Image (cartoon, rainbow, N blue to C red):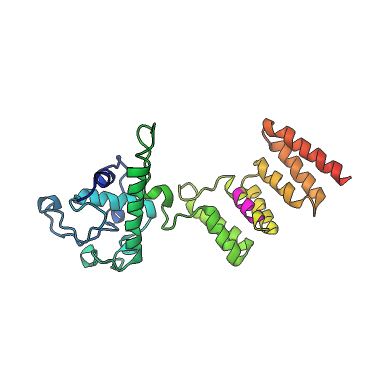
Amino acid sequence: MPSPSERLFFQRRFPLRLAWPVSVLLLFAFVTAATSQDSKPKEAEGPGFENLRVLPSDISQQDLMDIMRFDFVGGLGVRCSHCHVGEEGQSLSQYDLASDDKPAKRKAREMLRMVEAINGVHLAGLDDRAEPAVRVSCETCHRGQTQPRMIQEVIHHTVIQDGVEAGVERFRELREEYYGSHTFDFGRTALTAFARTLIAEQRRAEAIRILELNIELYPDYWYTYRMLFELVMEENPERARRELERAIGLAPEGSVAWLRRSLEEFLAGSE
């Protein structure tokens, strides 16, 4: 029998949401057993699901559908065949839903156990919790992608494998596809944070190119110019001065004095 914390996690917990497309409503990824194709409601004959390892054995069809629809379809952006043995275009009655052959299904079980532990044990044990209580879900980390990677990680891999220009192009492609969604952060600090990673790896030329891309996207973000100043001050003092002056002209009032001191020290050292 499921523990009280398991029942808490798998209870109906979804607020009213916008209607999903028909193709999404048909996708019950991670259903761990074959379901009847009869028109008679499942609750009237008992759930009848097989090979349930994490989900409660008495879970209703509606609760199971909600978990598949919102946690997996919405959270990871996957379809039935991602976890289950079957082919796209087949009826679910032709899937071997009870099979554990696919690694993704076994991983999904561990992810469900992890989420249950976070919500039911770790967060539940905190004092002075917010009301309503903060809870995590698959979507908290995955944000509509199968691997919960930040944009910096995705671009970093491309830069290391194929060079910085390939990384720039990859960033543009992802921004075109995902801008406005919650999958990736395309805000003005995303690329400056990535540039810091490249600087730590002694990839200064790559960092400069990434900062130049950020200026293209966010020309009014002063801190990008401040970082460029640091990177080019030894090899190109004239450019360094220009970048720092741009930063001074755009910076908030609280940072201007600091930037001016940096410029004065730089000019004094260049004499």
Compared with 145, 163 (above or below) is: below
Where residue 99 appears, as percent x and y from the top left, is 25, 67
Where residue 25 appears, as percent x and y from the top left, is 27, 53
Compared with 26, 132 (above or below) is: above
Name the residue located 86 percent from the left edge and 41 percent from the top edge: 268
Compared with 215, 206 (above or below) is: below
Where residue 179 appears, as percent x and y from the top left, is 50, 49
Where residue 263 appears, as percent x and y from the top left, is 79, 40
Name the residue located 56 percent from the left edge and 58 percent from the top edge: 155
**Would residue 194 be counted in the magenta stretch?**
yes
Residue 172 picture quarter: bottom right
Q: Is residue 182 left or right of residue 87?
A: right
| Residue 73 visible in this rendered orientation of the protein | no
**Would residue 254 be counted in the magenta stretch?**
no
User: Which quadrant, please, contains the C terminus?
Assistant: top right
Q: Residue furthest right?
A: 271
Name the residue located 32 percent from the left edge and 49 percent from the top edge: 70
| Residue 51 visible in this rendered orientation of the protein | yes
- Total label count? 0
Name the residue located 41 percent from the left edge and 58 percent from the top edge: 146
Nearer the observer, 34 or 124: 124
Nearer the observer, 248 or 131: 131
The span shown in magenta is 193-199
Q: Is residue 260 left or right of residue 133?
A: right
Magenta-drawn stretch, dominant element (helix, strand or loop): helix
Nearer the observer, 105 or 238: 105
